[in-house]
Image (cartoon, helix red, strand yellow):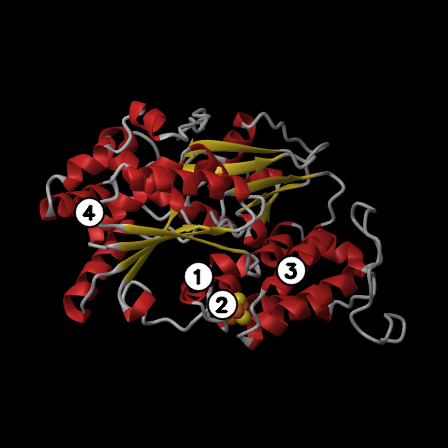
Amino acid sequence: MPDGTSRALIPTATTLADYQKQRGFQAYQRASGQGAQGAASILEAVRQAKLRGRGGAGMPTATKWQVVRDAVATRGGPPYLVCNAYDADLKSLVAATLLANQPFLVLEGIMLAAQAIGAREAYLYMHSTNRTGYAAVTAALNEARNGRLLGDLTITVVGVDLGFMGGEETTMLEAIKGRRPMAQQRPPYPAQVGLGELPTAIANLETLVQVVNIVRDPAAFAKNGTPASPGTKYVSVYDVAGNGTLLEVPFGTTVAAILKNAGITVGTDTTRGVVVGGPEGGVLPLTQLTTAFDYEPLAQSGTIVGSGTIEVLGPQTCMVDWARERTKYLTEQSCGKCIPCRTGTKRIAGTLAGIMSDVGVSSDLDLLNEFADYVPDGSLCGFGWHATHPLRTALRYYPDDFKLHLQGKCPTGACVPVRSHRFVTKGVL
Ligand code: SF4
């Protein structure tokens, strides 16, 4: 199992000259010189590398691109490409760092992907609050245009601030179309019907950076990771005080090794749990930190790769309150289109508020377990599918926190009652 010692700094190359010194655009120029053969070779290299999307879902990138190519053959084209550089998780350092330090690398990834699917128009979709990244990437785009590097490809930068849901793929397409940004029913998937009702490939910017790495040196890419998930992943690691570090770790590295590599020491006196996956991730107790950072092992543990953010919770964290805080945040971020997501998350947060305020009753646990299934089952998009991970993992790994609160005691003594979730008190019930 990888030990996660590959702490990588993302080198800085914000000018074309600097990027070219780092072998910049060589991969694209080699592939573009081969015409249709070049497009096929990029797709085949990505397929052989078994590249999985770094946006959280872990779908094989080559499969998605093949769907786009097949849809173009039946529905017509040209297809569109959207690079998702919108870090929905405000704690994620990935897009901000890559755009600010390596804007040309991101552009080369877009150019290779566009060539692989035959797109002539691409969008770089990002958070409008990422001012440094925006300045760097627009300057790089101008330099690339002036240097006639883009060929007939048009790249448009779109900056939006749509909260957590802004990173959801169908919401993103609606925003680019200028419509009300809300998630849409699938199928048809964007790879079949997207922008302009044409096939549209959506790829996270980290995925596209890995495409450049694969086309440059497939053997180097294959050296890291697991058979199911080759390569590396950028993770944003936060200590108890909220100090964040961006690391690049091979897939399969244990959560414990990632923390160690970030210089964070965990122990029962300093750590109550570790949150993996960002706002919709779950919490792991210290006994579960040997879990490998990879899609399937994390899913089995109740967490997700998600945004790749890992946060350490201090020893005073009450998991009832933590799950309440997380779910309350998600309640505010839900677009509200589906009733299970809109009202289910509210009911969960309200019930948890009642339990942490010591007015809960034992049947609240049945209610919470029911909602933990009901919300994902009745939701339209990934937001609702993952919204109950905080609750589920808190119930799974910290059942005593709930039991103690139902007896009127906070396990860490940290909870300050917020409000009752019902108009009657425990004594009356
Ligand atoms: S699951 Fe939630 S966020 Fe997704 S469409 Fe439904 S209401 Fe909106």
Please state which of the two labelled residues, at mark 4 or mark 3, is closer to the viewer.
4
In space, the residues marked 4 and 1 are separated at their CA atoms by: 24 Å
Residue 256 falls in image quadrant? top right
Residue indicated by mark 4: 43
In space, the residues marked 3 and 2 are separated at their CA atoms by: 22 Å
Classify residue 327 as left or right of residue 68. Answer: right
Q: Where does the image place residue 287, in percent across and percent down from the top left?
A: 58, 38
Residue at 33% across, 72% down: 187
- Considering the image in quadrants, where does the N terminus appear? top left
Q: Which mark is residue 327?
A: 3
Q: Give, as a three-letter code, the residue at label 4.
A: Leu
Q: Give, as a three-letter code, the residue at label 3.
A: Thr
Q: Which mark is residue 154?
A: none
Q: Where does the image place residue 179, in percent across and percent down from the top left?
A: 46, 71
Residue at 21% across, 56% down: 66
Can residue 189 be seen in this snapshot?
Answer: no
Q: Nearer the viewer, residue 128 or 324?
A: 128
Residue indicated by mark 1: 172
Residue 81 falls in image quadrant? bottom left
